[in-house]
């Protein structure tokens, strides 16, 4: 694709009326993550060396209207000059945003007061429902800085491209947060670090969650055919056939994308949570908003927020959502594995082997996702808030905050370790079940082979009965003088020719065998051709005698 073909104006695109399709028979498959484009530390974001030559640079319009009134329209290039139109097109920053007019973009709020208390839901601003006619009002509303807040959490449903540009411009967000979120790429990084002032941290992780899905109108036979006709895709959702319910149960990969602006400003810090559009049927902003709001109802966490003023603890508390989802999913998966094992013992369903091998591949993928989760929590633990070094925190408060952060991160890491052991047990169970099913199949093949060998033995008995008579008939049918008076050949000539051809055939058969007890392994053709002589020399002791003579064998 040339740069001319991929160009489009960096200004806000009109929201088209192209939908994302109807309800699928199973959850849609997420794209395979491209890890090299996950973080801004990569010096060549969204470049492919095999196809890209040189990215063409563009200049952002410098008119007063473009900079002042509609400056967010130039995002990301107005803030990050290397993000030109070609790069924006490659990363699908616009394409992967919600473009269906039926999907309403909503921004939900959760406010944490300076005291550490969560602002009640009834007193929190209602969600902002964004449409084309409210663009300028949204930009104005984002400029408002409510007083008395320690942290504001913004949760965005059905992200539209203008909303992405506004948030990126308003909070100076590195585009890698949006590209990794929109492309389902796990990432974690720190940027914009200003000592004693603040920084930006991003955590984008994939986790496994159990979700219902409407049953498709499709026969089980067709399902097996369609599943067996393609390779295993670890990005696909895993159907739990063991669950009996009106809606099918799936293990699907969900996304938790968080970007936090930690700041010492009086307006407090901000967390932005991206949520995939409705077509993915993943965790909605409203759902996560309700869960974050309930964190403030926890007596344990409320004491922590009152003792420590570090807003990073709220960021850590949100990560527990992924752990709860993992825990519930592994419980369902273990039950499903037990169901497959029981069916493997009682039935001889060939589709079980295919499903078990598929689950084994998924389990390896799940292990990598769980490791990403562990690394994300470790990243939060090892990335203290620069604001803690400001005069707002005393040495005692700084030590207490760091101690609490380490303690809570260790608690979460301990739970992740427990999930890792549980996932290992499920993997071992899957391997054992696969081995059992395979051994059952081999046992069936052995029984069939024994049955066939019995039939062949009966045929051999019949052959033994008729073999002497066939031999006598062949002898009396020979045209030799000893049997027929007017014959020209003798029985001795027949025996001589038969012996010669038998010896020649045996010689050639052994010669063309690469592995044989009559010659050494790895011997060349001519050495194998002389195998009768080498065999006789080796077994009669003549070889040692010839080696002992001067000028003998090497």
Image (cartoon, helix red, strand yellow):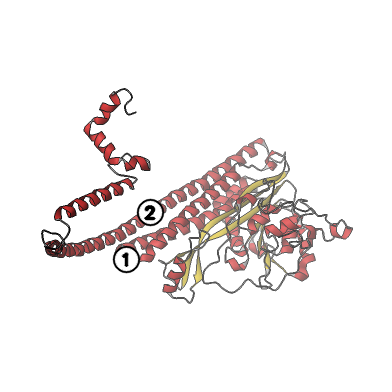
Quarter of the image where the C terminus is located? top left
Q: In the image, residue 212 lies at what x, y percent?
A: 50, 68
Which sits in the foreground, 438 or 426? 438
Q: In the image, residue 464 lies at what x, y percent?
A: 14, 62
Q: Is residue 223 left or right of residue 531?
A: right
Q: Is residue 93 left or right of residue 352?
A: right
Q: Residue at x 27, y 51 (%)?
A: 505
Residue at numbered disc 1: 348
- Whether residue 145 is visible: no
Q: In the image, residue 170 lies at what x, y percent?
A: 76, 55
* Mark 1 vs 2, N-terminal side: 1
Rate crowding at label 1 as few (under 14), some (14 to 19) or many (20 or more) other CA atoms within 10 Å.
some
Residue at numbered disc 2: 431
Q: Secondary structure at mark 2?
A: helix
* 210 to 525, vertically: above or below: below
Rate crowding at label 2 as few (under 14), some (14 to 19) or many (20 or more) other CA atoms within 10 Å.
some
Question: Looking at the image, how many numbered discs can be counted on the residues?
Answer: 2
- Whether residue 334 is visible: yes
Q: Quadrant of residue 102?
A: bottom right
Q: Quadrant of residue 480?
A: bottom left
Q: Residue at x 47, y 57 (%)?
A: 362
Q: Quadrant of residue 197?
A: top right
Q: Secondary structure at mark 1?
A: loop
Q: Which residue is the extreme one toward the right?
A: 64
Which sits in the foreground, 28 or 168? 28
Quarter of the image where the N terminus is located? bottom right
- Report the Cα–Cα distance between label 1 and label 2: 18 Å
* 216 to 519, vertically: above or below: below
Q: Which residue is the extreme one toward the top?
A: 550
């Amino acid at each position: 694709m040339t740069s001319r073909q991929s160009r489009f104006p960096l200004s806000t695109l009109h929201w088209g009326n192209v939908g994302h399709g109807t309800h699928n028979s199973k959850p849609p498959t997420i794209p395979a993550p491209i890890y090299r484009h996950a973080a801004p530390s990569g010096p060549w974001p969204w470049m492919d060396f095999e196809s890209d030559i040189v990215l063409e640079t563009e200049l952002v319009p410098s008119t007063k209207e473009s900079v002042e009134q509609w400056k967010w329209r130039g995002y990301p290039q107005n803030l990050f000059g290397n993000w030109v139109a070609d790069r924006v097109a490659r990363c699908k920053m616009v394409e992967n945003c919600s473009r269906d007019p039926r999907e309403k973009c909503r921004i939900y709020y959760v406010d944490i007061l300076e005291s550490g208390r969560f602002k009640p839901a009834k007193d929190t601003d209602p969600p902002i429902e964004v449409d084309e006619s409210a663009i300028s009002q949204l930009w104005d509303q984002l400029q408002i800085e409510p007083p008395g807040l320690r942290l504001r959490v913004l949760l965005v449903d059905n992200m539209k491209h203008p909303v992405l540009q506004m948030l990126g411009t308003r909070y100076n967000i590195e585009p890698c947060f949006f590209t990794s979120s929109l492309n389902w790429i796990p990432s974690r990084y720190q940027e914009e670090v200003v000592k004693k002032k603040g920084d930006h941290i991003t955590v984008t992780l994939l986790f496994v969650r159990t979700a219902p899905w409407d049953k498709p109108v499709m026969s089980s036979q067709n399902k097996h055919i369609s599943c067996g006709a393609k390779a295993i895709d670890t990005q696909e959702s895993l159907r739990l056939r063991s669950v009996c319910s009106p809606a099918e149960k799936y293990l699907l990969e969900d996304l938790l994308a968080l970007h936090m602006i930690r700041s010492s400003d009086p307006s407090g810090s901000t967390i932005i949570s991206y949520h995939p559009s409705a077509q993915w049927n993943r965790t909605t902003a409203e759902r996560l908003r309700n869960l974050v709001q309930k964190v403030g109802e926890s007596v344990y966490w409320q004491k922590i927020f009152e003792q420590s003023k570090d807003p990073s603890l709220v960021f850590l508390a949100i990560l527990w959502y992924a752990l709860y989802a993992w825990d519930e999913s592994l419980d369902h998966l273990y039950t499903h594995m037990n169901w497959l094992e029981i069916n493997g013992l009682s039935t001889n369903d060939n589709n079980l082997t295919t499903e078990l091998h598929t689950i084994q591949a998924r389990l390896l993928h799940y292990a990598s996702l769980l490791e990403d989760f562990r690394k994300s929590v470790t990243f939060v633990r090892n990335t203290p808030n620069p604001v803690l070094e400001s005069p707002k925190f005393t040495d005692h408060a700084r030590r207490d905050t760091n101690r609490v952060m380490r303690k809570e991160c260790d608690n979460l890491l301990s739970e992740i370790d427990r999930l890792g052991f549980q996932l290992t047990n499920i993997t071992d169970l899957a391997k054992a079940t696969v081995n059992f099913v395979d051994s059952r199949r081999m046992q069936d093949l052995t029984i069939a082979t024994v049955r066939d060998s019995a039939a062949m033995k009966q045929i051999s008995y019949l052959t033994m009965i008729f073999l002497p008579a066939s031999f006598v008939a062949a002898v009396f049918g020979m045209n030799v003088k000893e049997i027929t008076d007017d014959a020209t050949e003798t029985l001795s000539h027949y025996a001589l020719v038969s012996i010669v051809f038998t010896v020649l055939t045996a010689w050639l058969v052994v010669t063309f065998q690469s592995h044989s007890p009559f010659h050494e392994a790895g011997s060349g053709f001519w050495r194998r051709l002389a195998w009768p002589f080498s065999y006789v020399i080796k077994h009669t002791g003549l070889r040692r005698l010839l080696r002992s003579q001067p000028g003998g064998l090497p």
